[in-house]
Amino acid sequence: MLTLYQFNSCPFCWKVKAFMNYTHIPYDVVEVTPFGMKELDFTDHKKVPVLKDGAEIVVESSAIVRYLNDKYADLLPAPQDDEWQAWVDNTLVHYLPPLIHPNIGKSFKNLGLLMAVSKDGALKRFFVRLAGALVMPRVANKMKLKHQIQNPESEFQAALAHWVDKGLENKAFYGGEQPSLVDTSVFGVLRSAQGMGILEAAALTNPAFGRWYEACRGMMGA
């Protein structure tokens, strides 16, 4: 059985899970403790996602998806796939931290949603959530500066409009009538923000995006 080591809050972990859900690859999930990361003692790589396939250890989301596609799924690539995958990893994902963690209060609320799957006790969850809420807004602000994001909300909306106009191009999915590997990557990264009002607001502003997202959600896991 494949085992994915993850943070439920991690967009790159959801990128892997969306692909595995869509291609019906069975897997187990291990939620990694943010402080200490003792669940990753078997590897020197201390970032999630990490995939274990027997004795094989694969790290970094794009490498994991390639490994899974080559070994278990074999979705056919399209000519522009690499360009869109780079856009997901290097552009789209950077809007999420400033939107999820704009301040301590909002961060604390959203971390509560993200930690709902945690099996830790209530007291430990509270302190991890509180620590995260104190740290993540500062991390998000550094990311805004690093990636020159001036207005996360409007720039995120513009990125989604770009996806709809240039990626979907009036098709149901990037892949046409059925999702492709790129659809799973875009959906997966966005899925990490589900339930926080960010995607819901985007769907109201851009109904074509909303229809695509809900269609993917039905195929790639709620």
Image (tube, helix red, strand yellow):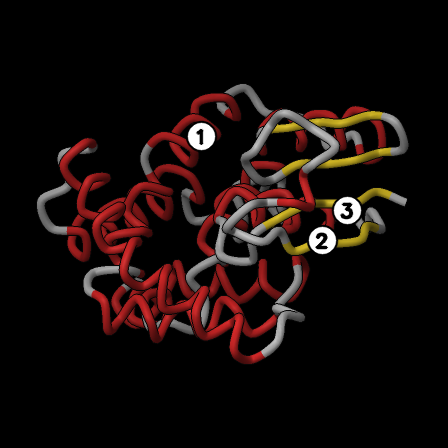
**In the rendered structure, are the residues bearing label 2 and label 3 in contact, judged by CB atoms less than 8 Å apart?**
no
> From mark 2 to mark 3, how far is it between C-alphas?
20 Å
Residue in the image at 59% along x and 63% along y: 217
> From mark 2 to mark 1, how far is it between C-alphas?
29 Å
Residue in the image at 69% along x and 46% along y: 39
Q: Residues within 10 Å of mark 3 (few under 14, many from 20)?
A: some
Amino acid tagged 2: Val
Q: How many marks?
A: 3
Q: Is residue 178 visible?
A: no
- 42 versus 207 height, above or below: above
Residue at the spot of label 1:
84
Residue 100 occupies quadrant: bottom left
Work out whether residue 104 or residue 193 is closer to the camera in this orientation and state it: 104
Name the secondary structure under disc 1. Answer: helix
**In the rendered structure, are the residues bearing label 3 and label 1 in contact, judged by CB atoms less than 8 Å apart?**
no
**Which mark identifies residue 207?**
none
Residue at the spot of label 2:
30
Nearer-N-terminus badge (3/1): 3
Amino acid tagged 1: Trp
Residue at the spot of label 3:
23
Q: Is residue 45 visible?
A: yes
- 180 versus 70 height, above or below: below
Amino acid tagged 3: Thr
Q: Residues within 10 Å of mark 1 (few under 14, many from 20)?
A: some
Name the secondary structure under disc 3. Answer: loop
